[in-house]
Amino acid sequence: MDEYIVNIGVETHIQIKTRSKIFCRCSTEFTDEPNKNVCPVCMGMPGVMPTLNFDVVPLAVKTALALNCEINRVSGFARKNYFYPDLPKGYQITQHEFPLAVSGTMKLKSGKVIRIRRLHLEEDTGKMIHDQDENSLLDFNRAGVPLIEIVTEPDFNSEKEVVEYLESLQRIVRYLGVSTANMEFGELRGEPNISLRRRDDKNLGVKTEIKNLNSFKSIEKGILLEIERQKNILLKGENVISVTMLFDEKKQELKPMRKKENISEYRYFPEPDLPDLLLSDEFIENIKKDMVELPNEKFERIQKIYCLSSEEAEIIVSDKDFADFFEKSVKGIKNVGRITKFFIREIPSILKEKKIGVKNLNFDHNHLNKLFKMIDEEKINLNYAQDILKKMSLTGEDPDNIIKSEGENISLSENEIEKMVNEVLDENQKEVQRYKNGEEKLFGFFVGQCMKKAKNRADPKIINEILKKCLHDRR
Amino acid sequence: MDKKLLEELARHSFIELEEEEKIKFLDQINNIFFDIERILKEVNLKDITDGDYYKKYLTLFNHDEPEKEFTTEDLLMNSKNVKNNYIILPKIIKEKE
Amino acid sequence: MNIDRLKKSFETKEDSPVKMVDLVYEKIERDQLNDFITLSKNIAYEQAYLSEKRYEKGETLSDLDGIPFSLKDNFAVKGLRMTCGSKILSDFVSPYDSTVYKRLKKAGAILIGKNNLDEFAMGSSNETSYFGVVKNPCEKDFVPGGSSGGSAASVASDHSSFSIGSDTGGSVRQPASFCGVVGFKPTYGKISRYGLVAFSSSLDTVGILTKNVSDCKKVFNVIRGVDEHDSTVDDFKCEKRDLKKICYVKQIPHADPKVTELYEQVCSKLETMGFLVEPVTLDFIDLSMAAYKIQTMCEASSNLARYDGIKYGLQKVSGQDLFDVYSKVRGEGFGKEVKRRIMTGTYLLMYENGKYYSLSFKLRDYISNSVDRIFEKYDMMVLPTSLSLPFKIGERVDDPVRMHLSDSLTAFANLANVPAININCGYYQKLPIGIQFVVKRNDDDNLLEWAQIIEQEIKKNG
């Protein structure tokens, strides 16, 4: 790969989470019943006209602001003309010459800045599926669902950068409440365009586009395959032809789109049925005021004030609800570092096991905060706290109640521990004898027995010390 | 415009033409173009200010509240080939390419 | 079938909406003008009975209650066929109502049927309709004009009291002129286009055809105004003014001498009525034809892309591939005029990145500015509606250049977006000749007031 530099630009479509479609009043709710959420407008019946659902605008503006874009005070709609069965009108209403926003940026972890060329509004197409009898079937439930399209400059040099960008984008729109952005449901669709050029060549090479990438894995794989394919062509001294490649998820391979489906000529022109969209400074200022903290801002702040490692902070900010939950739960906790691991291991594993989000846990941040305070005040040890957390996740009980109902003290005093250790040693005289005879690896066995008896109410470190002392006394 | 371009145009417009139509259309479309170009040559369009003939900005907006006025049946009644509320595309007899 | 008189006869029980509908259908049957593609008898009788009951109770809904009307067959009515005069939609049944129809229904008017038209409103003689040509009621070998030919013929022959048409470059005014009725094209954005099948979206206007100007006003006031389905409509109105200064055009190239003669008579009459009448020159007529062609063809190529034979309309069951299916459906479903315009429009949009389409907006700016300048000085402009008299059926088919000439005095009003109305001002033998009155943007109500005064004066003198 040394000989060639890879340049990748990405076009991303994100479904905006509104209740009704962008140009009619049909519901956007997902349904299994085909052609249920349709009307003459989104089916492209003769004589219909579009009217704009205004609620898409603030959501798109928020996204544009999060990507440091300039918002155009006047933007306009246009028709993108092409024939395809899933396109009811023979054209798609989009924005062309005057997009909603332009000239944004996104910073990657490496510090590299990706330039965003434009962000605009458009309508989604219907869906075409194929049945067992090899019929092609049309469903227009998705036709007219609002989309934002975000186009970057060809600033990416690897598939890893593209994936990082898309992951960040996904996180941003989720933070903003703009979209659920699940790739497997097509709510976020990334289409990379790729070109290779010789290291000494200043001009970009011929680019190809990849479609049908439904996961981050596919994106990575698709781009790698395409780089490989182009490289082989160039090494043979041949020229890359501009085509659209389709990624086959099952076979994990790329194949070029059929020629006739490969449209290059869209004959854009302004949509005569929709006057321009005018946004006031005040409108945009109000959106700015209402902006939530963005993932990267949160990352930096959380890492700093709670003294987290960047890995820890990364996991915590991966989801906005999760990060909020974290911050509420650690309120007033002095040593946050000690309990952070609950958010790295225990809680994520509970969520994963139950396949839910933090909002659906059966305990809330107040419960958790109580538990953490007990740790903070060293009333319980971490192991015991883990046990209580497990019980909380099962029963939803207050940690105080759990502890009380077990009828046990919060933790054992050193005297109590010593008493317990001696009990263990008395119960295991034979082993004590063997230990005395030099079989020192039995120490671990005693520790285990003590722990069992203490039911996690004692710090293993203290048990260790006392056990050593007692064994020594018996020598 | 020549016949080849006309045929390409027909493909772009997805309109199948008969030979006789091609000859006639070629002539007529060329005339229209000739006419347009002749007229445009005679006019000086510099320093024209924007006309006032169109509505400039959107003032009518939808509320983000779904409304269901039509049934699937209403919308599929003109489709001849429907299965389980899907519209079935015409059968492809054989792949050419 | 003047609306006022009809309404009075319903009120005095001299006549009834149901009897009226009977008579209308009998007359349509007898006259055989082919001015209707679909008759909506079920709807008409249902509405007529309901209206009759309202008259009995004295609870009528509006000035239009019980009044029979028709719609050009490019307006949607739920459950009724809407063909647009095309084979490709010859069996299409609309699943929804156009806004115009909804408002007329609410006002109690009675839908008689859907009028014949040039295919997708593209034409000036009604000869491009898949459902055949309409006969001019004044002289049956002659065309009724177009594209709202069926509408004009039906109003002229008392098949309906009024008809709703569409005017993109003269499609309401020119047939009104050819059939001797009133044809009004309002300012773009006064009447909702929702449910009017688009030909050229930036020029299409909903127009009204009636027997007289007073009726036209009544219909206009029922259907005008903001609509939740059309973002281009407003409620803007001009202040009421008196008509003082009128301008006319001295030399009109290519005009039939009989048209010119009547035109001059009308101008003199306006002078005797006490208005100041002065000549102006129009330098944009040629330009307007170029701009009109570019805009309508480009927009039509996009507006008519939805007719692909997949969801509705003419459908084919198979093909070599999907694109072959499209081409077959569209090749067979569209008539020659429509195919030529779609292809020219496609070419214009492709050619040098759509340079001509962008240019056509510049041309519109130019025309609009010139027209605005005229209306800074004058309240109204008088022009012949058509250069020619109605011509014989078949005479100009296959002569697109001459056919397009028939739009040459009307299209500028659509391009500059000003209102205009045709009034019949006389006849040559049996053939009607119409004169067009044009005013500035949004001055629709003044235009109708003034046109009514002029109409009365002309009728008085015969």
Image (cartoon, coloured by chain):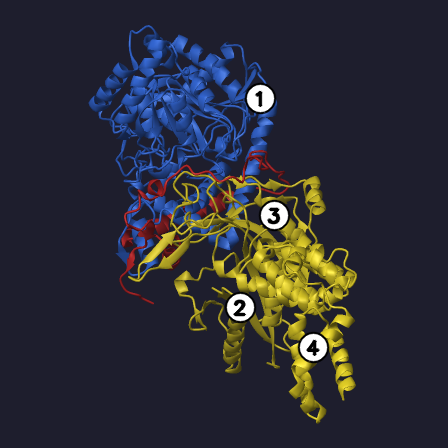
Chain colours: A yellow, B red, C blue
First-in-chain label (4 vs 2): 2
- Locate residue C22: give its quadrant: top left
- Which of the pair B92/C384 is nearer the observer? B92
Image position, residue B46 (x, y; %) = 62, 43
- 10 Å neighbourhood of mark 2: few (<14), some, or many (≥20)? many
Dot 4 and dot 2 residues touching (CB under 8 Å): no
User: Which quadrant is home to the N terminus of chain A?
Assistant: bottom right
* Mark 1, residue position: C238
Mark pair 4, 2: CA separation: 62 Å
Q: Nearer the viewer, mark 1 or mark 4?
A: 4
Image position of A231 with respect to B87: above or below: below
Gap in Å between the C-alphas at discs 3 and 2? 26 Å
Q: Say few, some or many: other residues with alpha carbon within 10 Å of mark 4 (under 14 / 14 to 19 / 20 or more).
A: few
Q: Residue at x 31, y 29 (%)?
A: C115
The residue pinned by badge 3 equals A59
The span from disc 1 to disc 4 (Cα, nearest Å) is 103 Å
Would you say the residues marked 1 and 2 are in contact, meaning their CB atoms lie under 8 Å apart? Answer: no
Q: Is residue C77 visible?
A: yes
Q: Chain of mark 1?
A: C
Label of residue A423 in the image:
4
Badge 4 and badge 2 in a common chain: yes
User: What is the chain letter for disc 2?
Assistant: A
Residue marked by disc 2: A219
Using a 10 Å C-alpha cutoff, classify the residue at mark 1 as few (fewer than 14 neighbours), some (14 to 19) or many (20 or more).
few
| Residue C345, position as x, y percentages in the image | 43, 47
Q: Is residue A119 left or right of residue A457?
A: left
State the residue at coordinates (43%, 41%).
Answer: A41
**In the foreground, A214 or C120:** A214
